[in-house]
Image: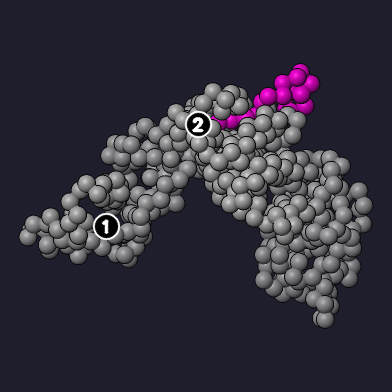
Amino acid sequence: MTSPALDVIEFTLTAHTYEEDRELDPGDMPPPYRRAFWSAEAESESPSDRPTPGGIERPLSITETTVTEATGLAHPWDAISDLMFTDRKEFSGELEFTDEGMAEKWYRERTDADRLLGNPVLARRFEGEFEGVDYETARANNRPIHADRVWIDSLLEQMFDEDDEEMLDLVEVRAPEEVEMTLDDLVLTGDQEGEIKKVMKAIEHREYLASIGLQEIGKLLFVGPPGTGKTSVARALAHELDLPFVEVKLSMITSQYLGETAKNVDKAFEVAKRLAPCIFFMDEFDFVAKTRASDEHAAIKRAVNTLLKSIDEISLIRDDVLLIGATNHPDQLDAAAWRRFDEIVNFPKPDDYMRADILRVITRQMDIEEFDPEALAKTTEGLTGSDLRLVLREAVLDALTEERTTLTQADLEAAVADFEERDNLKNMDMMDGDPDALIAGNGRSDADEHDHDHDHERDSGTPQEHGD
């Protein structure tokens, strides 16, 4: 059961309980409540006794603003103003209970076990009163504090001063809640699923692995063409495991100030270790091999050597950092690069069966008449998951130009044909080909002229985007 009034009363009761029970820490608060009360200046300790960058200071200020931020309700006072045990201070906008006992009774009669298991603070307060509700279970189910955006931002602010701001241009940090892609949104090969399961087990049993001396675990290299899901899988894994996602594109470590390049590498690894447990994703890993084999500036080569040394020194078991490298060009990697990773995960272009499954996933929320993913998959040989998403996007946009939100199989087939035509145009050699070939109307017969306006309009869509 849920309602605006129940949401507001739960938030207020949670805040009161947290204030009174000094054994509770920020990790007990549901993530939206933590965000509403978080202070970057507060001093706090995490459950692991590691100092955290900020915290939640007592006493808590329960205002319409904090309630709105935590619950999304635009007018929280309107939701509870008719309850006889609530009051609002006109000047400050603070909400309060005039009788907390009545508020607790009102809430107890309307809540349930599922709701309490999503709130460790109240699970502790009502433990034993609801079957299946206990504090430890609720705490274990709660998203860890190190996965919160507010915690990440506070840490980055603590780590970097104004002189280091350019470093944040090299490293992108996402909180798990900001990763839109989940593992359920992806179609994986058996090998990919197996490696993900092994990684999840390694994270779950880190202490056991450390006790038997297995330290070199948790360094994965994703290899495959663009658009096959390397980045998507890494990000979805962060979402699944509630881990911050730290991404660095290795081509960007070449600072305009070459003497700073090696320092940037060190700083990127420092960010990952400070945000641990986290996933550290290094894209464009083939940049390492290209630099080692070239006559690049000595400062850049030193940075690459620093990078390889840093990879050697970081560990999932010791540092709580899962390291994932990704490359579109595995043929360019040398033995020194390969041996840094304990697992290689192949990301091939999908076969007919995978493309059909990908089409099913992409179209889950679409209305398509006579949809035949198997037939469509047979016409899209060589296309990646990223390509298929672009095909579906164009089909939807074309239908919208005709004021339709229901698609047909013919719409999808036309979008495939358009995509292939744009792909061919992208690959044309402008220097060696006919310079008039790309002029609108050239090469058309008179019979084609009546279709000119429609075809030109359809073929001038957004250029395709490649990515993982």
Q: Which residue is mark 1?
A: 459
* Front position in the image: 313 or 110: 313
* Front position in the image: 68 or 150: 150
Q: Give the colouring mode of the picture.
A: one colour
- Report the Cα–Cα distance between label 1 and label 2: 42 Å
Q: Residues within 10 Å of mark 2 (few under 14, many from 20)?
A: few
Q: Which residue is mark 2?
A: 293
Residue in the picture at 22% in, 46% down: 432
Q: Quadrant of the N terminus?
A: bottom right
Per the image, label 1 sits on a secondary structure element best described as: helix
Say which amino acid is labelled 2. Answer: Ala
Mark with earlier residue (1, 2): 2
Residue in the picture at 31% in, 64% down: 401
Labels in figure, total: 2
Q: State whether residue 419 appears in this view.
A: no
Say which amino acid is labelled 1. Answer: Asp
- Magenta region: which residues? 205-222
* Horizontal and vertical percent position of residue 382: 33, 36
Taking the magenta stretch, the answer to whether it contains residue 172 is no
